[in-house]
Image (cartoon, rainbow, N blue to C red):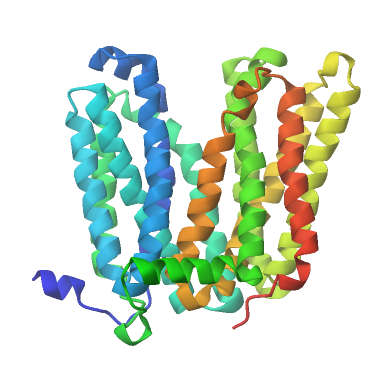
Amino acid sequence: MISSLLAPRTAQPRLAALLLVTGTAALSTDTYIAALPSMQASLQTSASVVQLTLTFFIAGMAVGQLLSGPVSDARGRRAIVLGACVVFTIMSILCAIAPTGGLLVAVRAVQGAAAGVATAVGRAVVTDIYRGREAAALFGTLSAVGLLAPVLAPAIGGVLLTFGDWRVVFWFLTLVGVAMTVAATVALPESLPPERRHPGGLANLLRRSRDLLTDPHFAVPVLVQCLTVAGFFVYIGGSSFVLQEDLGLSAREYTMLFTVNALTMVTTSVIFRLLVKRTGAVVLRRCAVVLQTAAVLVLFLITLLAAGHRPPLTVVWTALALMTAGLGLYFPSNAAIAQNAGRRFSGTASALSGGLPFLTGALTTPLTGALGSQTVMTMALCMATGFLLAAVVAALGRRYTVEPVD
């Protein structure tokens, strides 16, 4: 029975299975955000411990991506994805019944690692089977869903909390894990047959990583991604404090701003899918880099010149919305370019191009607070630095940026 489930399949994966496998991580990150206070009271723990359940999940995702991609180049994709789906489901159950905050933090780390494995290997499946602009279009779809999931997740959690306490959210994620496992079993074939696999062992895994990271065609888009994510995660980690404390937005007003901006990313990701087969990923990435860099530079300059360095909210919102619109084009186009450049070791490429930027973003998320100044000026400066450096690297490395071909 088990061997038949793990046996290689020859059919192409179904889109729904790919969306579940690669999108569950985004859905699982912040579904329970609204329940953090009640979780603290229920577990009789501190606020910092409860917040660590989110931090450790994100860290687990980064580690899961970095480790699983290279291994899947040697072992194949299907068994690793199925294993990750099962582990995610079990960890969701353990989260739902966790008796202490410390145990919940530990289990969330493993749950995040499983989600990271599924995400990285799922991207590798796309690279194994699809090529050129068809692969780029599929990355656009995956990106749109990945960006929409964290926007909808808190709302889903809010609805679930009307039926019970925070544990209901993790029972819901258990059902998601079951659906992901079934979808992967039924509709996610083995995309890397034995004859295309690479030798295992730590030395070989490191050799493949070194091979990719010393190839400028792969290293340049990954470096651009790291710098872009650094600037973006300053916004993710600091905008709530900055816009509410420095500009006086209410929690509801901030939620509206953040949701609208996130939806601009989803919209431009859909536009990317519609345009990429006609224009190519390289052109769309160039447009994205120009748009997002110009938006944050304008925000910085206007903030610098504004009285008290507090620009009007309309200016801030418009600049941030244009930045996120650029990112909706940027993320799928850069993913397509990086995966195409690393196609020879697509699992390792997926791990590095996903895991390294994620680690970079985790380091820059608390940057505005670490600098001791939760202001628009600090946020704009940090964001402008990341995006401008990304644009410079993209421009200097233009000759290494190759259009994915069919």
Q: Position of residue 317 (x, y in %)?
A: 74, 30
- Quarter of the image that includes the N terminus: bottom left
Toward the viewer: 6 or 261? 6
Q: Position of residue 99 (x, y in %)?
A: 17, 23
**Left or right of 125 on screen, residue 277:** right
Toward the viewer: 102 or 248? 102
Question: Relative to 328, does residue 317 appear above or below in the rendering?
Answer: above
* Whether residue 256 can be seen here: no
Toward the viewer: 382 or 335? 382
Residue occupying the far front of the picture: 203
Name the residue at 55% across, 53% down: 144
Question: Relative to 195, does residue 182 appear above or below in the rendering?
Answer: above
Q: Quadrant of residue 121?
A: bottom left
Name the residue at 23% across, 34% down: 95
Q: Position of residue 97 (x, y in %)?
A: 17, 30
Q: Position of residue 89 (x, y in %)?
A: 23, 47
